[in-house]
Image (cartoon, rainbow, N blue to C red):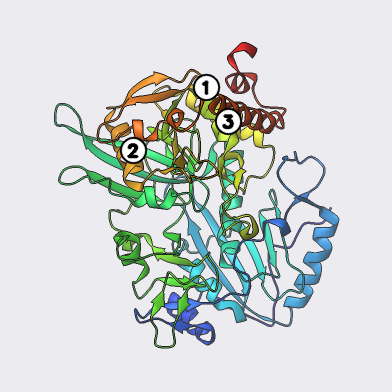
Amino acid sequence: MDKLKRDVRAKNIIYNPSAKELRELAKKDEQTTIFGSANYISKVRNRSAKNTYVVYEKGFKKGINQQYIDKEKALKISKEVNEYLKDKELICLDRKMGQNDFVLHCRLYITKEYARIAYMWNNMLFPPEEGREPDLVSIYVPEWPERIIFVHPDERVTYILGTDYFGEAKKSFLRMAMYEAKKRGYLGFHAGSKVLKVKDYNGNVKEVGFILFGLSGTGKTTLTIHDHGLKGDEGVIIRQDDVVVMTETGYCYGTENGFYIKTEGLDESQKVLYDAATKPHAILENVKVYDDGRVDFANTELTSNGRGVILRSDVLNTDQCIDIDRADKIIFITRRNNIVPVVAKLNPEQAAAFFMLGESIETSAGDPTKAGQSKREVGTNPFIMGPEYEEGNRFYEFVKNNPDIECYLLNTGSIGAKEDFKGEKITIGVSTEIMKQIALGNIEWTEDEDWGYLVPRYIENVDLEKYNPRRFYTKEEYRNLIEVLREERINWLKKFTGLKEEILEWIYAKEYV
């Protein structure tokens, strides 16, 4: 059968223009800010998940939560696209993903009119190695009359058509990279990574590697870049914000040289991100900029999904490395509002279950019409290709075979919500303090009688009684909430028929085990 085209013919192709040249090519679309940076306004202002497909052909194992397009239809569209591009001017931009042993060379073809997207993508990855052919290719035609995105996992090519949202370019390569990782026996995670340097009881500084799972808008970036109040010999090193690749030993490869941040409500109180987002070479997208160049991050009249591309080097507490030697602590960030504890410590079976549950909330970056609603996404990763259960089983094997890797559930929402009460908000200060105490190993734990995971009995500097879910409900109300949540979780996990039984067992009520 024919293959989707990875190389493109055009009337003219501009090969590997510099960042300065790309900005000049995009000048017609630029709003220049008082900081000297560029802001661009797109027509489409969030990812088009409903229009995204994996190309299916015989032999490919399907996942449950993915949409598929037949190879024949994909080929037909790709031929029409390539015929159209013969009369167009294109930009061909090569960049490198990763630094060390996990490196992928990426090539973006995009029509010249949309140089702004190439300019933004240029700042996300590393300079290419000369003479290297691309491992991954994306062909991007924003002006195409039909909005459709399709990716062929094994031919390593993505077509992005009919949308001008930058996130589609960025994620097209990361989606493919995570699939490549899986083929190599690794796991690609939608997760941030950092190192906390803390002093042990003897005054010796130890480095503790963290990876943080979480969908966009749940606090993943905030917790990834936070300094946890650590000073002097202690501190943090920020490595990645979006995608990491973990090996069977717990080593985590980084992927990107930039961060793609949400800017809604950004102000000087969020010093690290604000400082980076107001640099001259930051690139803003769908942020309100007035005629005099003033930037209004609080204004959401364009969208609540305003974004910015910032360089890692402009983020305080980064260094030259994007990898971490070991994921000592794995954090699953959730945002629930009633009975999920502020933090829970998980055994390998529970950790694999929460990997599969991916409990969180929908944000404007995903489906704006459902923003704020509860949702579940395996691995908090909407970019998995192939059977999801395979990733859950592999994650389980990784953590089971590395017993010194500890896994936690961290709630960044509220506790005790009712009809007349939004719940006791879990502050950023509480979440960052919990992470610091996890790094120090200072938390005292006790088993939760309903779920079997460990919940804190004592955390220094945290008022746990304030966040005790049982104090907000009658016994009957609390029991009903437990059973509703248990049923939701069971129904979700049962969809993945290849998932190991031991991952499922813990979720059932004790009388059923």
Residue flagged by tag 3: what amino acid is it?
Leu
> Which residue appears at 76% of the width and 71% of the height?
81
Image side of residue 457 versus residue 87, left or right: left
Q: Is residue 379 left or right of residue 386?
A: left
Q: Distance between the residues labelled 2 and 3?
A: 27 Å
The percent position of residue 353, horizontal first and vertical second, equals 57, 29
- Asked whether the beta carbons under mark 1 and mark 3 sit within 8 Å of each other, the answer is no
What residue sits right under mark 2 in the picture? 435
Select label 1 or label 2 by which is in front: 1
Query: Would residue 161 appear left or right of 275 to someone viewing this image?
Result: right
Query: In terms of secondary structure, where does tag 3 sit?
Result: helix
Q: Name the residue under label 3.
A: 481
Task: Kindly indicate whether the residue at mark 3 contacts the one at mark 2 (C-beta within 8 angstroms).
Answer: no
Pick whichever, 166 or 507, lies toward us. 507
Camera-side residue of 75 and 350: 350
**Which quarter of the rendering shows the C terminus?**
top right
User: Label 1 vs label 2: CA separation?
Assistant: 22 Å
Amino acid type shown at disc 2: Met
User: Along the polypeptide, which appears first: circle 1 or circle 3?
Assistant: 1
Image disc number at residue 451: 1
Q: Residue 278 in the image: x percent, y percent? A: 34, 71
Q: Report x, y in % for residue 202.
A: 14, 27
Report, in whole angstroms, how far the alpha carbon at label 1 lies from the one at label 3: 13 Å
Query: Looking at numbered disc 1 in the image, what kind of residue is underneath it?
Result: Trp
Residue found at x 73% / y 59%? 51
**Along the viewing direction, whichever of 269 and 406 lies nearer the viewer:** 269
Numbered disc in front, either 1 or 3: 3
Q: Quadrant of residue 446?
A: top left
Q: To which quarter of the image does residue 194 belong?
A: top left
Residue closest to the eye, 375 or 68 = 375
- Residue 193 sits in quarter: top left
Question: Can residue 397 be seen from the camera position used here?
Answer: no
